[in-house]
Amino acid sequence: MAAPWTTPAAVRESAGKKVAGWLSGYVAGAEFDPVRFPIRGPAAAELGGRYDEARRWAADWDRAARGPLRVEYKKVGGRSFGTNDIPAAAWLDSYDHAWEATGSRAHARALAAMAERTRSAHPALLPWLARRPLKALDLADSWDRLLAVTGWVLARDTAGFYLRQVDIPGVDTKFIGRHRGVLAELLDLVLPPWRVNATGDGFEERYGFLRKPGYVRFRCSVPVAGFTELSVRADELTAPPPGTRRAFIIENEITYLAFPLPAQAIVIYGSGYAAGQFGPLAWLADLDLVYWGDIDTHGLAILSRVRHRFPHARSILMDEATLLAHRSQWGNEPDPTSAALTHLTAAERSLYHSLRNGTFGERLRLEQEFISFASVTAAVR
């Protein structure tokens, strides 16, 4: 079957795919480069058998040639019908014609207005508008607030500020959170290099804001100022309680509370992957450090993460013997990980592979609160 003849609608559809590029050039002030769209029409041999169809097709193009498309014609000859001029290509010669052909005039006007306001506020952001015009249009309702946030950060030393202190009408921490990706792109364009911490962890650290502090919750065998349990900022816990020689990190809260704490020891509530917050506690490197989590792929992943920071850390009750001794308490891990864990012992690595491969059962999990308390007491002792 021969390919269909090109219609004005098909050309407009092809033009629609070029709108983003035209908007980019329009914002950047580039001259419009006329675009030619080839038209496939009837060959001379088709005119006889499809004359009425060809006449309707040509009439559609006659109407389209009134604008905004400019139609280029070619001659097609035949013995039966003589020589005929038929459309060979359609042209768009200007931005105005392009907007009309694609129904993009409102978008072009909106983008031009955004560019004008940007030129007045932060001209350095004009290249961003030219590079991402469709994204900019999606943000049209928020653009003035995004410019305001950018200006607020540019005008201040943000050290000592939380995002909550960005005081702009219509802007709150949720607004900044929703748009932090775009704001990062904008701020990188306007801030001097020394204001951007390229290796910072997250938006706040990258632009000098204070981050929500991490907290460490722990119980201690010897009361501190009369308290047997405390929750303190991790960056302020610069030393362990006096006399502490051993630290246990426990993943589950109720197990943490019930944990049989030996003398000269503290037990820290790990709260799953929050165990990564213990990096600032450099003094853990000087203690006998023990981690205990669930026997599942994520529990071993957390252990690997703790040991990455503290290589001397050891585990308890995270072995094959403990797993097999508690068959009646086995459960299923909802979303196992298959990450490469590089900080496990040979025995732990073997257990991890068994869990991943389903050696004892698919997606097997033994949560630490289901391990008999006698086993816990014996392990601690």
Image (cartoon, rainbow, N blue to C red):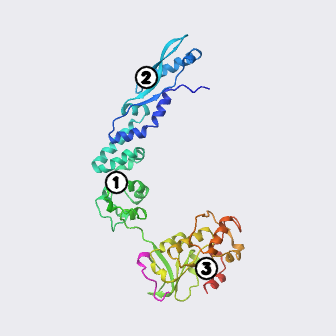
Quarter of the image where the N terminus is located:
top right
Q: Earlier in the sequence, mark 1 or mark 3?
A: 1
Residue under pointer 2: 72
Q: 223 or 27, which is in the foreground?
A: 27
Q: Position of residue 76 (x, y in %)?
A: 50, 17
Q: Nearer the viewer, mark 1 or mark 2?
A: 2
| Extent of the magenta region | 233-244
Above or below: residue 96 compared with residue 221: above
**Numbered tag placed on residue 316 in the rendering:** 3
Q: Are marks 2 and 3 in contact (CB under 8 Å)?
A: no
Q: Earlier in the sequence, mark 2 or mark 3?
A: 2
Above or below: residue 102 compared with residue 137: above
Main SS, magenta region, reads loop
SS for dot 2? strand
- Which amino acid type corresponds to the residue marked 1 in the rendered image? Leu
Q: Is residue 238 left or right of residue 56?
A: left
Residue under pointer 1: 189
